[in-house]
Image: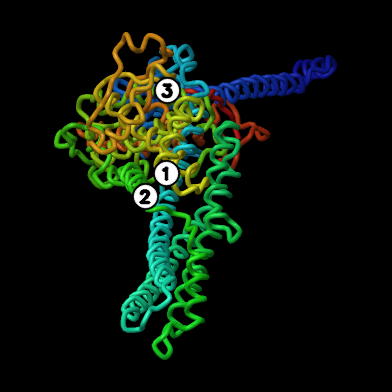
Amino acid sequence: MCTEGWISKWEHRGYQGSLTVFFALILTVLIAIVCTSLESARYSALSYFTAQAQESALESVFAGYYRPLWERYHMFFMADGPGLIPAMEDYLSYYEEPRKGAVKNGSDLYGFRSEGSQAVEIVTVMDDGGAPFFEEIGEDMKKHGAENILSALTGKDKLAEEAETVSSYMEQLSEYGTAVTEIEESFALMDEQGRKLKEQYDSLNEALQLQEWPETVGSEMTDKAVSCAAEALRISGQEYEKIMTFTEQLKKGVELEKTRLLEEQEKVSETAYEIMEEGIRDLTEYTEEEGSRRKAVDSLKELLERQADGLLNIEPWENGEITDAFSETVKQGKEALKELSYEKEQDGKKEECSFLKAVKDWKDQGVLALVLDDTGTVSEAYLKEDDYPSELGSSKGQSSDGAAETALKKGTAALYMTEHFGTYRKSEEDTVLSYEMEYIIGKYDNDKENLTAAVEKLIGLRSGMNFMYLLQDKEKSLEAEALAAALVGFTGVYPLIRLTAKLLLAAWALAEAVNDVRRLIRGDEVPLIKSSSDWNLSLTGAGECLRAGGKTVQNLTQEERGGGQQDFWIYERYLQILFLLGKTERQGFRAMDLMEANLRQKDAGFFMENCVYHVSVETTFQAEARFSQIPFMKRDGASAGKYRFRKLAVYGYQNPRSAGEE
């Protein structure tokens, strides 16, 4: 009875188990929300921490830059390209294992593991035409105030380019001058045969003035004349063939020179271009059929053939008396040969040939013998055969924007090279080659050939600069013209006189250039642009210098320099000019050759091709869910209960770095 009443009372009040279930559901939802929030926050933190770990590991790798390269050449590069990824993964392990060093409190709340890293892009010192190399040069030279001294080189590359163009013209002019000399010598031999033939005609004409000239007395004279005619015909034919051979060679060269001159017109001043163009016009007098000299050769050949044939094809005697036909031939021949172009004056011509051909003799003995008193002191060091950067660089391609060829980079690189590499005048310690700057400018694997190439280029540069000065110095130009007139003026051939004057100026400029380079090699200074007070050799002195093989060096005293301009340059500064004239990227790779060769003397495992400057690395991380598995969180193919992150890190010594997530 009581029990039933109690139950009835309880039921009446309406207490049921639904309230407990409700609170349990509410608590479950709250726990899910909290866990989801925690897991979401943890997911975001994992994304951040993995990115930070990747960047820190990559930065740690690059902190291990190659110290010998920095200490000697002031360049930041990580020297172990193949070991970059393994090194980075090793540094990542400090962030993956809490007790290894990154986290020391034992918490593994944000535990993650890297599944692997791969390089998306690795930029080495040799990539993009050596662009990283030149960027490091720029950074180093900025710290040394390169901007303050670059002004000395500003515009000098254009001036040197003009000098190089003029020097090339001078060299070609000398070659053409040699051909012209050969033509003139053959023409002189033809003319000599004409004079001999003229002497025979004069003798025959005098004999014809006698009323009686019996065959018994005159046959010897006529036979001699006929023999002379045959010889004149033979020799003139041979020499004419020689003239035509040299004329054809000269014609081809002149056509090429015309084309080249038009292409390089912008590289030279208007005055220099007009002088060069005039020289080409003088040469066309020999090559064109309507040219005055070509016509003179053809006319002389025709004259000799006609007058020789007259003696050879007409019988002089008939019935013991001279024939009327022969008598008429003699009279006509005497009249036709009375005016020949040359007189019997060849001393001046021989002197001129001796003066100008000495240039060729110089080249035959070698340029080092011209500028060094003892060539036996020249270094014989050489680079051992190996796959140096300059050999591998061609496969890397050229820079896409041609940045290495900009005036600023060229000038900055020129300053850097002379500061960090040795020269003939200033050698560095612990180097494979003694003449390093000469190697960078040249292309040979040994000191001697590189020094020879540098000296040849310096002589060419100075020759061009000197020739341009001579063209502007009216007094010296008139002096050369006067000497040319004295040497070949008797010919009356004005193209030859003008050409000889230019050849004399070129020889004068060359002799002065050799004198200049000898002074530079000895440690003296030489102005880039000369004035009258800076000029050393007279025209006579140039001739003596030519004949003495360049040994008669003249040097102005400091007092004698007083009236001239004072921008005197030393040997190293001239090498900077030669550097500006070269292909900067190619020269940069040669500089890398020297760096590699020098540093490998102590570290055989060092290679410039492994020097990393900039890198992009993708790393895949994996982490397990801790509080809950959130379905909509990015799993990227990870198994249940795990997340996967793909991170991209970019780092470089001079490039801005950035990181991202794929």
**In the image, what residue occupies the spot 46% across and 49% down?**
491
Q: CA distance from mark 2 to mark 1?
A: 29 Å
- Residue situated furthest front in the rendering: 211
Q: Mark 1 = which residue?
A: 171
Indicate which disc, 1 or 3, sits on the residue closer to the N terminus: 1
Secondary element type, mark 1: helix
Q: Is residue 437 visible?
A: no
Q: Which mark is residue 345?
A: 2
Q: CA distance from mark 2 to mark 3?
A: 42 Å
In percent of width and height, residue 467 lies at: 45, 32
Graded by Cα atoms within 10 Å as few (under 14), some (14 to 19) or many (20 or more), the crowding at tag 3 reads: many
- Amino acid type of the residue that numbered disc 1 sits on in the rendered structure: Glu
Position of 509 compared to 1: left or right? left
**In the image, what residue occupies the spot 41% across and 36% down?**
483
**In the image, what residue occupies the spot 45% across and 50% down?**
176
- Residue situated furthest bottom in the rendering: 319
The quadrant the C terminus occupies is top right
The quadrant the N terminus occupies is top right
Position of 438 compared to 10: left or right? left
- Amino acid type of the residue that numbered disc 3 sits on in the rendered structure: Leu
Secondary element type, mark 2: loop
Q: CA distance from mark 1 to mark 3?
A: 20 Å
In percent of width and height, residue 230 lies at: 38, 76
Q: Which mark is residue 528?
A: 3
- Amino acid type of the residue that numbered disc 2 sits on in the rendered structure: Glu
Q: Nearer the viewer, mark 2 or mark 1?
A: 2
In percent of width and height, residue 74 lies at: 35, 21
**Figure quadrant of residue 321:** bottom left
**Figure quadrant of residue 658:** top right
Q: Determine contact: label 2, label 3, CB under 8 Å.
A: no
